[in-house]
Amino acid sequence: MRWRWSCPARRTAASATSTPARFSATCSSSARRFPRSGRCTPTSASRARGGTVASSSSRWTFVPYQRSPVGRHSVARDGAPHRGITLAVLCVSSGSYTLLQSALFPVLTTLQTSLHTSQANVTWVLTAYLLSASVCTPILGRLGDRWGRKRLFVVALGSLAVGSLLTALATTLPLMVVGRAGQGAGGGVLPLAFGIVHDLLPARAVAGAIGLISGISGIGAGLGIVLAGPVVDYLGYHWLFWLPLVPTAAAAIAALIVIPPSPVQTGGTLRWPAFVLLSVWLVALLLAVSEANLWGWTSVGTLGLLLASVVVFVAWVRVESRSPTPLIDMRLMKIRGVWSNNLAALLIGTCMYAPLSFAAELVQTRRSAGYGFGATLTEAGLYLAPQPTVAILLGLVNGMLTARFGSRSILLCGGVFCCASPVLLAFAHTSPWEIYLSMVCMGIGVALVFAAQSHISVSAVPPAQTGVSAGMTANIRLMGGSIGAALIGTIITAALRPDGVPAESGYRYGFLTLALIAAVGTVVATLVPRDRHGPARPPAPEAVRCTSSAAVTRGG
């Protein structure tokens, strides 16, 4: 039996009616305010047997607690016996997701050989994942608000597991790309996990739980980069997906059993045309960029796809502008802090993901090519390891730095480091310490950018829009990442030598192109308004979407 305190309302003329008065009152003895509406009940001790106890000193009545059908903490007490198990399931799920996200960074070269495909085509293994995550994450978030976060959390884990199964069985590139798209569709795991934490745990435990999940996610991302090499070297690339499949499937089953139902919120009707249009213009753009070398930049196919992407993009913007429940709220784009922050996220995001994969390819290039170290997969993972390590460590003090120097200053500093990393990769890749230095710069840059943009996206909008704004920034950053991966893949492929190995100039121009785009994004960041004086506004539960997997991988 659940209980709560209820105070009898002051007798008025209305109290004589059959409808009990509703109120929000303060107990005179404890001075504790109860914001929820109560129900007036007789204070007769004769009703104590039925579950009502009167207190004549404070005039408070003890009545059975009735859970509200909708509310952030409406299931918190019901889930108390399973809080530890629930948190463990959320941690395992988030760690598995980020591990799968980062594990592919060092192994594109191996997949190119094993799947008998080209440099340009194998890039779709990375691009498909980022594209799927950028499109499906807001869909899952919207459906979670409408149908319950637990249900959609299980769906996201199911998609992650099915995608892992397909990639584990894949011996051809199309099946591998489909499986990676399925894994990307599980991108809602992190934001839904944070939402479940807000639903089920008491307020005092929310921050610690989110910190734990974020920490486990960061560890998973780091392990994915480091362990990918040994797993592929000794077991084969298939086991890179078989091993995470086991805990992912187990977590999905456990989530279905132990996580209490989440409260259903009125999230409005999901507009599927917006989802379709977003997918179409992104796919058309990425396909045109990826195949331009094969078809020719002035060919009918390339120009037709580019034109189609522009037309569909305009149509998508119109649909989103008129939708009461948009995937990306165009109305918020009228706010200076929002449009400048998101444009910077799109541009800087182009160099947050692809450099990791192509830096791994660079160090694996045999020395006879005139560059590269001839590194094994295991060694390539170790070259990349400083990036997630530095990002995780810097994440411990990001909040303090943002409060001390302001989010715009931190964003500008992060943008500079994000530019420096690919520049170093372009010109300084003859010694291992130069690769380590570039990865440290990338770790610093991504950590600072994520922290600053998280704060900007929340503080630039009204409190009711913080979740929408933060989720929008994270998704736009993923879009930038998918565009960057396709772009650098095209540039490097254009510089292939007769022996099939990319020329060193291909890597140089590719990294410099990403650095130039990130530099433009850093300039755009100067348009972000300075922080207003006063304490930072706390983010809404949905605002944690901006600390998605991409943040902890530093890589959505």
Image (spheres, rainbow, N blue to C red):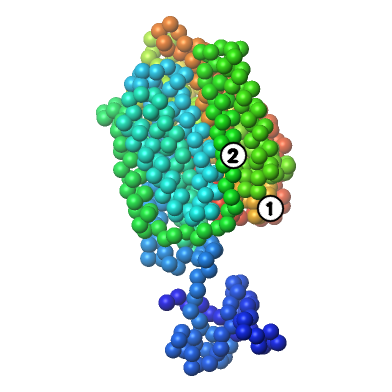
- Counting from the top left corner in percent of width and height, residue 494 is at 51, 13
- Is residue 416 shown left or right of residue 166? right
Q: CA distance from mark 2 to mark 1?
A: 27 Å
Q: Which image quadrant for residue 405?
A: top right
Furthest-top residue in this view: 498
Task: Find residue 462 and name its label.
Answer: 1
| Chain-order first, disc 2 or disc 1 | 2
**Circle 2 crowding by C-alpha within 10 Å: few under 14, some 14–19, many from 20:** few
Furthest-left residue in this view: 234
Residue 144 or residue 84, whichever sits in front: 144
Task: Find residue 273 and name its label.
Answer: 2
Question: Mark 2 against mark 1, which lies toward the viewer?
Answer: 2
Q: How many marks?
A: 2
Residue 509 or residue 82, whichever sits in front: 82
- Is residue 537 shown left or right of residue 494? right
- What amino acid is at disc 1? Pro
